[in-house]
Each structure stands twice: as structure tokens, then as C-alpha cells.
Amino acid sequence: MLMTEQQEGGMKEFTRQDLRKATKFVEGDYSGINPRSFYRKLKRAVEEIQDPQGFKYQTKGTQEANLTISSEDVGRKTGTVKGRLEAHSDWLEVGNGEFEYRPYGTHGATGIVAGIVFLVLGISGAGLFWTLLGLVGIGGGIYGYTRKEKEQFPIIQQDAIRVLITGEVSERTRKGETETRTDIFANMSVVFSGDVFVAVDTGALDELDWTFRREMVNQVKRWHNDVVESEREELLVEDGFIWQLKGWTDRNVQEHRGAIEGAQSVLIHDAPFEYRVAYTQLLEEQLTPEMQENLRTHEAELMAELEELAEDVEVYVEREGLQHTTQLEGSTDEPNPQLDGE
């Protein structure tokens, strides 16, 4: 029986094809092992991965909710196994992205308005001084309003691992002198996938100039709208001359932080996994060359991490699977209707 998202404890559905689209992935085939023991070992192996800060991942998934063993032909002691596991690291600051903005947009818009007022006064008879002041104000305002510069913003990074287990299970019953023992064995195909996600670090916004923070809010909203798939999900983005004029009353860092976190949270927490991938790709385009190189290096490290994880699990299967195989010498094929449960 397929499990719903709610039955799976909130873990999002993902398929083999989904994982093969990940930043990095490794595949492995394992046989001769109890799938429940395998899942417990897999979860421990992920939780034991370390980086310089200590244990790296927090796992999401339980044997009870995310490992399904279903009978196919009752009485023949065969069935299928399907399991999922997710793990996420903490968000860590890793570098900077950058984009172009108008650092003096608000000042320039104000200068243009003031210049027009002074020019009207001068033309209306207030004198040459006001006329000249108006012309200077308009000229300086236009220069300030149209001037663009590049500025950097802090980026945080998170690693994510997803594991999909699929395969076939069978039961074998061994009769001993005093008891009959039944074991479940599986032939499993396992895909280990790893993704590196990036996001805007809202904790460091107070270090940015307020004009750049306002542009940052708008930019994150635009990225959000580029990622989502329906107009209903899109956020309102204010822009233009009037928006620049309103800048003097829009300088609160907490409000800017809340707006960015609100737009990002949908993409990196609540929405489909594909949204996270698309958002990361958009941010990667804004990364500095140094940061892009660091990201490529980190992705290679994540690939090595996945390979080591697969090897660690393989060693466990070889050791424990051999033990079970030895125990099964002289087994019988008596049916056991308890394949679904334990």
C-alpha cells in the first residue's frame, strides 16, 4: 500500500528520476540483508557524518513511517520494500553574491521632485537663483536616479541528502532443535542523492545599506516569482519612481528581514523540492566568481561524502548479510503470512 505524504510524517514524495536530477547522486545494489536493519544502519551512518563543526546532518524519516514492506503473493513469502530518508545540514555562511542596483535612487528621485519645485518657483518670478537651483536639482537628481552600482550580499549554504530504497523481499524459515526462526531478506536498489542549496542570509542584513536592502527585498521577490508555477503564488513587487520616493519611510531592517524570509521560506521549506533547486540556480547566477568556484569544490566534497556513505553501507551489508546467509543453511520454504509486520 502506498503511503500518503501525511502518513510519511510530512516527508515529500520523491522518485528515482527525481534523485537522478540532483546535484550529485550515487547508486548501489545490496542483497541478503533485513531491510529494517538496513534502514536503521543507513540512518545511523548519515547521522554519524561529521564536518569541522561536528555532526553534520539532522535526519528526517523513521522506520515505522518511511519504510514500507508489502506482500505481493501471500503464501509465497515474497513482497516489495520501499523506503525514504532525508537529511539536512545547518545553514552556514559561505560567501557573497552580487547584483546591480541604484544606490541613490531615492535621493535622485527626491532631487528631481525638489528641482521641479524650485524651477517652477523661479519661472514664476522667485528669481534666477531658484531657476538655477531647480535646474541643478533636476540634473543632479537624474544622475543619482539613473546611476547603478554592483553590491554584494551574504549567502548561506545547506547540504541535503535524500535516499530512496526500492527492491524485493522474501521470507525464509529455519527450523532449529528448539524453535523455528523466520528472517526477511531483501535485494535492494538504493539511490543516494546530494544537493547543495544557497539562500540569502537575512541575519546579516543590518550590515547592508538601507537602499540596498530595499532592492534586496524586491530582488528576492522577483526570484520567487520566477520560480513559482502559478500567478496565484506570485508576490507583489513595487518598483519605479514612486517606489524610490517612498524609500525615506521604508528603512526598517526588521521589516526588510521579514519580507525576505517570507519570500524565501516558501522556496526552501514549504514548496516542492524543485522550487529549492530552481531558486538555488537563480542565486548561483549572482554569485561572485570566487563563490562559484567554492561551490563547485563543495559539490565535489558532497559527492565524495555520498560515495563514502554508500561504501560504509556496503561494508555493513557484506558483514551482516554473510552472517544471515550462514544462519539460513537448511532453511525451509514454509509460508508465513507475517511478511507485512514485525
Image (cartoon, grey):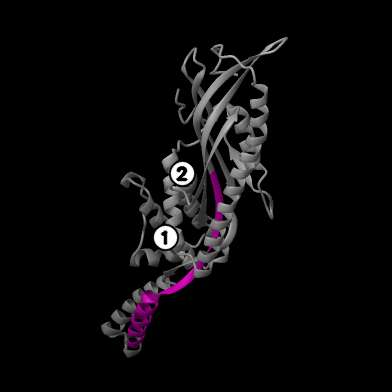
Q: Which mark is residue 269?
A: none
Residue 104 horizontal/vertical position (percent): 43, 74
Which residue is depicted at the point 65% across and 46% down? Answer: 49
Q: Is residue 11 visible?
A: yes
Residue lying farthest to the front in this orientation: 330
Residue 6 colored magenta? no
Q: Circle 1 sits in a helix, a strand or a loop, which is it?
A: helix
Residue 150 colored magenta? yes
Q: Circle 2 sits in a helix, a strand or a loop, which is it?
A: helix
Residue pointed to by mark 2: 19
Quarter occupied by the C terminus: top right
Which residue is depicted at the point 37% across and 63% down? Answer: 243
- Per the rendered image, the range of residues in magenta is 132-161
Q: Nearer the viewer, residue 31 or 154?
A: 31
Amino acid type, mark 1: Gln
Total marks placed: 2
In this picture, is 225 found above or below 115? above
Residue pointed to by mark 1: 219
Quarter occupied by the N terminus: top left
Residue 322 horizontal/vertical position (percent): 65, 31
Residue 71 horizontal/vertical position (percent): 49, 19
Residue 139 horizontal/vertical position (percent): 34, 82
